[in-house]
Image (tube, helix red, strand yellow):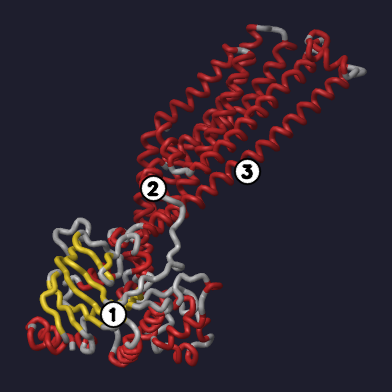
Amino acid sequence: MINTFRKLLRLLTPRERRRLGLVFLGVTGAALLELVGVASIMPFLSVIGNPDVVQENAILNWLYTTFNFPSVNRFLLFLGLGVLVVLVASNVFRAVVHWALSRYSWMRNHSLSRRLLSVYLQRPYVFFLGQHSSTLGRNILAEVQQLTRGMVVPGLRMVAGLVVVLFLLGFLIAMDPVLAMVVVVAVGGSYGAIYLFVRRRLRRLGQDRVEANRQRFKITDEAFGGIKLLKLLGREREILDTFSPASYKFSSAMATVKVVREIPRYAIETAAFGGILVIVLYLLATRGDLGEILPLMGLYAFAGYRLMPAIQKAFSGMSEVRFNQAVLDALFDDLRGVADSVPRKHGLEPFRVEQAIELRGVTFRYPEASGPAVEAIDLSVSTGSSIALVGRTGAGKTTVADIILGLLRPQEGSLFADGREITDELLPHWQRNLGYVPQEIYLTDDTVAANIAFAVPKDKIDMEAVERAAQIANIDRFITSELPHAYNTIVGERGVRLSGGERQRIGIARALYHDPQVLVLDEATSALDGSTEAAVFEAIDNVARTKTLIIIAHRLATVRGCDCVYLLEHGRIVAQGSYDQLIESSETFREMARGYA
């Protein structure tokens, strides 16, 4: 348990740890007021049980004579009001501390979620190739919340409960050590025995919950991501049957831990009544005088009233923390020691190329791959020219493009611009000079303008740049004449209200919004029909007049006008030249031209 809290504390920033210290001071203050509230009941009950104690007790006698009370009854009223004031102040302060605990805990949900998103956003592109998107979303939105709700919140409440328990038990031991130790052994021993009995099961249930939750998110993400094909094949029932076991396992684990957390309270509360009888019999046997017994009985009854919730809170917190150990383990490595921000790149000066872009001796191997995806790649792209990367599936075309885009960093060789190596320091400036059009255009459920100026805050969108990019991409006329609200038209989730060609041209406009010097098109027309492809070609021709183009293509007809075509096989460049030159010199290229023309 101590190691768990140490691990949790390591996730907090120095500022968050300082604030936690302030919260703990508040918890300690609340525990002191709790102690004062419990202790204040004893003088009041002492006077009720034996009015002569006013004369016998030095403190009570001083209060009685200093304030010149006319009678013991008036003094008793004063003591009762004093107890009430102390209890009200204690409860008000406890409410404030509870608010502080809750706010601190749930603000960690904000800071940890933001930090985890920052971690993922700063990871290299290759990291995402081995991750399921639902896992990352689940970690940020669900698992961090579970860490907050199941470890931070109950952990702080557990500490608060333990502080109250220690203060009150210390006071009770001072009043009657034997009786207090009996209470400690009976109540504390019961809770301790229950916790030791269930702790391993709690850890196992926590691991089951994490795995089941991963499966739930993965299945639902894949179901809705492929809903069109799912509906066509009529496989709704199969998806439901796959989802059900994971959902049942998740819910079962959550229900079990709630029961384990609450059951001891009912058992101990049942035994509490018998405990009161035992205390009464013990006091009668050892002291006999009812006037002396009454204050002590009232003290223990009131202390028990305050102790039981505190002990239950501590036990519940320990159970929740144990149950959610697996969540902490799953998130710890990702969250530890990473800055809570992502550097801004949109204000950087782009790295402009005057002469040529080059790959020199580039070799890249994907993690856990048996061999390199590309090997010993040498190519050059002159400024203002257009080149094409062609080859069969798996030849390494997209890998080469991703290296040029700076998304993948080769294990050997490097990317150069005007003879200058694009290092990690220069990479953000280099990427500010690039535009990219993938085969499948991702559109958000937002306006056309927001999709062209992708990820730019709405109040900072440059509409002149949006319209200029749309004109070059040959989509401006369609937007202004066919869409009901022109650039303010909502395109629907993933652009569902647009055709493939329209989405593709919006993708080209998006790539042109920042006016890049270099444009990379990755199979940008492979999924389009002939007439739609012609419209996109026209857009590409418009771009080619002012940009350096790097085109990845299956259909070799799309690369006829390129200045140089590179043919790749098994991650190597096996031929290069103009389209006509390769038709003459390469049998592989001729076969591809016949198959894809």
Q: Name the side, left or right, on which 14 lies relative to 62.
A: left
Helix, strand or loop for disc 2: helix
Point out the tag, 2 or 1, that comes first from the N-terminus.
2
Tell me, for residue 383, which label it has, or none.
Answer: 1
Amino acid at pointer 3: Trp
Point out the tag, 1 or 3, that comes first from the N-terminus.
3
Residue at 19%, 68% (x, y): give it: 360
Q: Position of residue 596 (x, y in %)?
A: 18, 86
Amino acid at pointer 2: Leu
How far apart are the two marked residues, 1 and 3, measured between alpha carbons? Answer: 62 Å
Residue, disc 3? 99
Helix, strand or loop for disc 3: helix
Residue at 40%, 38% (x, y): give it: 202
How far apart are the two marked residues, 2 and 1, measured between alpha carbons? Answer: 45 Å
- Quadrant containing the C terminus in the rendered view: bottom left
Above or below, comparing residue 433 to residue 584 in the picture: above
